[in-house]
Image: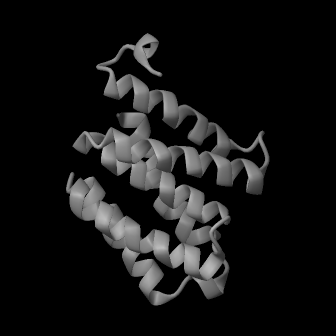
Amino acid sequence: MATANCVFIGFWCALALSQPAAAQSAKWKLLVQEAGTLYRQGKYDRAALVVKKVLELAERELGSEHPAVGTALNNLAMLYKPQGQYAAAEPLHKRSLAIREKALGPEHPDVATSLESIPELYTTRCGGSRSAHP
């Protein structure tokens, strides 16, 4: 989980710094900060609600195929995992992977993050046994 924490927390910094100035509205920045704070406090359900708002804003401001949307999807899925919402997390991870592969190319580190997230989800869901995933 420590790796997931680093990836997730790193998202907030990367998202805030990597978007064009137009995408960095005051609302965007506040939501990103709020979600990061809630995540660090272990308030995953509340953080998920905020990340959904970040996702909606990213889709509206940047388009549904932008890498920031893929990152928001991945992070929303990561918030669902500690809550045991594996069925909700899986399609988010898969959509994140598809967006990132298309937008960034198969060799990009964010694609690798998405590729790692799916088997990690199966491992967590199956109690630590990778051989039990579908």
Q: Residue at x 30, y 67 (%)?
A: 49
In the picture, residue 38 is in which quadrant? Answer: bottom left
In the picture, residue 87 is in which quadrant? Answer: top left
Image quarter (top left, top right, bottom left or bottom right) of the N terminus: top left
Is residue 4 left or right of 63 when viewed as pictured? left
Q: Residue at x 34, y 17 (%)?
A: 128
In the picture, residue 76 is in which quadrant? Answer: bottom left
The percent coordinates of residue 117 (x first, y second) are 50, 36
The percent coordinates of residue 115 (x first, y second) are 60, 35
Q: Residue at x 42, y 40 (%)?
A: 4
Is residue 123 left or right of 110 when viewed as pictured? left
The total number of labels drawn is 0
- Seen from the viewer's position, the closer of residues 68 and 129 is 129
The percent coordinates of residue 130 (x first, y second) are 44, 15
Q: Residue at x 34, y 27 (%)?
A: 124
- Seen from the viewer's position, the closer of residues 123 and 41 is 123
In the rendered image, the vertical position of residue 43 relative to residue 61, given as above or below: above
In the rendered image, the vertical position of residue 132 relative to residue 38, given as above or below: above
